[in-house]
Amino acid sequence: MVVGLIIAVIVLLMIFAGLHWASMPPSRVETVNVRTLHLEGEFVEGNLGTAVDPDGKVTVRLVAQQYSFEPQCIVVPQGMPVTFRGTSADAVHGFIVGTTNANTMLIPGFVATFTTTFNQTGEHLMPCHEYCGIGHEAMWAKVQVLPREDFLARARNTERMTCVPR
Ligand code: CUA
């Protein structure tokens, strides 16, 4: 009876959360051809990294593969919304940016996307957090959060940005 009660409470909580926050499975699932990922389209090597669109939107494009991220170091501005768009070239990967809430899975054939804002400058580790093979624990990148002005000054000179060498 106790177990039945616990299950009932959990199911009720799920129903409450689903209705209250209008949460639902993803409705717009974006796909990408994993076979031609490196040859054409959005995720070719020259298009990876951070770009500032003419309308001022910041987009980071990245690809995960066994056992690295491309780019290895991602640069983002402080205090501006940043949209990540990523996918995987082989196995299921994922990443989390330091202790922030930037966190997603990267699944071959699908584009993972989310938007977040980094409030503090600094450098974060960005490890792969889905077990993807024997090299999993060595798979990580870095994220540099630059002061907004520094970031925008760099963006004027480069179409695709990666980190500032230190
Ligand atoms: Cu990639 Cu674990």
Image: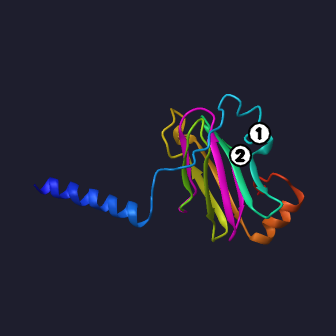
Q: Where in the figure is residue 112, as x and y percent of width and height?
A: 59, 47
> Mark 2 or mark 1, which is nearer the start of the sequence?
1
Q: In the drawing, does residue 67 fall left or right of residue 20?
A: right
Which element is circle 2 on? loop
Examine the image and state in which quarter residue 122 appears.
Answer: bottom right
Q: Residue at x 22, y 54 (%)?
A: 7
Q: In the drawing, does residue 44 fall left or right of residue 16?
A: right
Examine the image and state in which quarter residue 121 appears.
Answer: bottom right
Which residue does the numbered mark 2 point to in the structure image? 71
Q: Please state the extent of the stretch shown in magenta in the rendering.
A: 73-100
**Would residue 127 be counted in the magenta stretch?**
no
Q: Residues within 10 Å of mark 2 (few under 14, many from 20)?
A: many
Q: Which residue is nearer to you in this view: 11 or 121?
A: 11
Examine the image and state in which quarter residue 107 appears.
Answer: top right
Q: Which residue is nearer to you in this view: 164 or 87?
A: 87
Q: Residues within 10 Å of mark 1 (few under 14, many from 20)?
A: some
In the rendered image, the vertical position of residue 164 relative to residue 128, given as above or below? below
Q: Nearer the viewer, mark 1 or mark 2?
A: 1
Q: Please, which residue is most extreme toward the top here?
A: 35
Q: Residue at x 66, y 33 (%)?
A: 33
Q: Amino acid at mark 1?
A: Glu
Q: Where in the figure is residue 89, as x and y percent of width and height?
A: 63, 34
Which residue does the numbered mark 1 point to in the structure image? 45
